[in-house]
Amino acid sequence: MAAATTATTATTVAAPDPDPEPDTTDDTAVGDGTATAPATATAPATAPGGVRWTDDRPVRRLVQLAAGLVLYGTSMGLMLRASLGGNPWDVFHQGLARHLGHSVGLWVTVVGACVLLLWIPLRQRPGVGTVGNVLVLGAAMDVTMGLVDPPHWLPARIALLVGGIVLNGLATGLYIGARLGPGPRDGLMTGLHRRTGRSLRLIRTGIELTVLAAGILLGGTFGIGTIAYALAIGPLAQGFLRWCTVPPRRAPHGVGGKASGELAEAARKG
C-alpha cells in the first residue's frame, strides 16, 4: 500500500538517499564521497508515457511488477483476515470502511488516488508502477478477503498473520525492485524527503503515525499484528530486494524510476 502501501511504524526502512542507478561517472567525489559526474552513455528510446524501455528488461520488469502488486494486495487481505491488526495504512482504510461503508479494498484505491494528487505540489512524476498500485492493490485485497474466511482458532490467525507479513515483504521486493515507480504512499514519502531535506525515516514515521492514529479513532483494528508488521517488514523487504531488484542495463531513469530506486536502495542498505 499500501507503496503499496509498504509501511512501518516502530521500525522503518531508512537510509541516506543515494541514487540507485548504475555508476557511470568518473572518480570525482563530492558530498558524501559518491562520484556524480554526468554519464556519457546514449539514452535509450522512450516509450509512450515516458518510460525508457530500450535494453532494460521491459518484459521481466512488467511481469515482476504485476506479480508484486497482486501479491501485495493479497498479503493485505490475509493480514486483515487474521484480525490481529493491520499495517498503519490498512488500519486507516479499515476505519474508513467501518464508518462510510464499502469494502476496505475500495478505500485502498480511493485513498491511493487521493495521495497521488499530493504529488502535484511535490512535482513527483508517477510511473507505470504508481498507476498499477492504485488500480491493483485494492482489487486484489477484496478478492482475497472474499476467498479467505476469517479463522476463529488463534493459532490459525497467527499463522495467517505471519504468512501475510512474509508475503508482503516478498511483494515489496518484487514491485519496488521492478523499478517502474513507487506506490502513491511511498512516493509521497520520497517527495517530501526531497522537498524538505528531512530523513526518510523521520518522514515515514510521521506519516504512518498520523494515519495510524486516524485509523484507530475511526475504529480500525490496531493490535499485535500492527507491531509485528512494523518490526518485521524492514528486514524482510531488505532481504527480498537483494534478490528481486532488476539491475538496470543503462543509466537513465524511467518515469518514477528514481523514487522507486531510492526506496530499493534504502531497503537494501537498511
Image (cartoon, grey):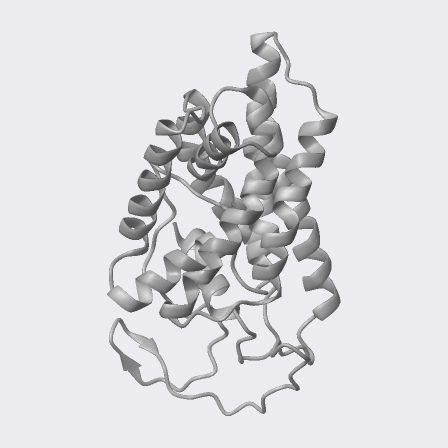
Quadrant housing residue 227? top left
Residue 251, percent across and down?
Answer: 53, 79
Quadrant housing residue 81? top right
Tell me what residue is drawn at x 40 percent, y 40 percent: 8
Tell me what residue is drawn at x 72 percent, y 63 percent: 60
Tell me what residue is drawn at x 42 percent, y 36 percent: 88
Would residue 3 be visible to someone looking at this image?
A: no
As drawn, 132 above or below 56: above
Would residue 28 be visible to someone looking at this image?
A: yes
Residue reaching furthest top? 153
In the depicted view, which residue is nearer to us: 151 or 17? 151
Would residue 86 appear left or right of 147 to someone viewing this image?
left
Would residue 77 appear left or right of 202 to someone viewing this image?
right
In the depicted view, which residue is nearer to us: 102 or 189? 102
Residue 260, percent across and down?
Answer: 50, 62
In the depicted view, which residue is nearer to us: 225 or 248? 225
